[in-house]
Image: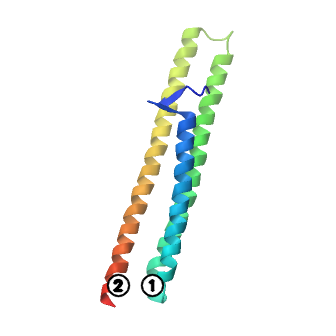
Amino acid sequence: MDRMDELFKGTTFADLMSDVYHNSKKKDRQINQLIAQLQPLIKNASDATIIVPLIKEYLDVAVKNDDHLVKLTAIVQRYISTKQTITGADSLLSDEEKQQLLRVAEQTLSEELSDELDDIDVDDKLLNERIRQTKEKLEQKDMNV
């Protein structure tokens, strides 16, 4: 794939992979920081029943982030392979047929990438909501103490 090939308006494959990689690393740092902040709050079994599931959820998010990276890479690899196959079939296909197949491959790539990015956004929103709920529970518990 040419570095100049756009997957989305103004976004190349290198840009996308860089964003995903850096977002994954940022999320990993955030998860580790949140876990470190939550550990001192566990003073008894009641605290643990609230906080430990949240820590587990943070770790699950880290695994999901890695899965998203793998899926995005697989999608783009399929696209690259398809594009190479189409352009390498010089004697079998006319230029018009090649262009048509490339358009279909690019449309499929765009749809799959959009779906995967939507999944990442949904996971992020769910985690943020879970964090908010847990913070509220902890604040209520602190007020009752």
Residue 98, quarter of the rendered image: top right
Residue 116, which numbered label? none
Q: Residues within 10 Å of mark 1 (few under 14, many from 20)?
A: some
**Horizontal side, residue 140 vs residue 74: left or right:** left
Going from the N terminus, do you reach mark 1 or mark 2 first?
1
49 vs 1: above or below: below
**Horizontal side, residue 64 vs residue 87: left or right:** left
User: Residue 81: horizontal and vertical position, in percent?
Assistant: 65, 29
Q: Quadrant of the N terminus?
A: top right
Residue drawn at point x = 48 percent, y = 88 percent: 43
Residue 47, which numbered label? 1
Q: How is the image coloured?
A: rainbow
Residue drawn at point x = 52 percent, y = 27 percent: 106
**Horizontal side, residue 90 vs residue 145: left or right:** right
Residue closest to the eye, 127 or 22: 22
User: Residue 139: horizontal and vertical position, in percent?
Assistant: 34, 79
71 vs 102: above or below: below
Amino acid type for the residue under numbered disc 2: Lys
Residue drawn at point x = 56 percent, y = 55 percent: 25
User: Mark 2: which secondary structure?
Assistant: helix
16 vs 103: above or below: below
Residue 141, which numbered label? 2
**Horizontal side, residue 50 vs residue 88: left or right:** left
Residue drawn at point x = 51 percent, y = 24 percent: 104
Amino acid type for the residue under numbered disc 1: Asp
Q: Quadrant of the C terminus?
A: bottom left
What distance separates the C-alpha of mark 1 from that of mark 2? 9 Å
Q: Marks 2 and 1: in contact by CB < 8 Å?
A: yes
Q: Residues within 10 Å of mark 2 (few under 14, many from 20)?
A: few
User: Residue 70: horizontal and vertical position, in percent?
Assistant: 61, 47
User: Mark 1: which secondary structure?
Assistant: helix
125 vs 106: above or below: below
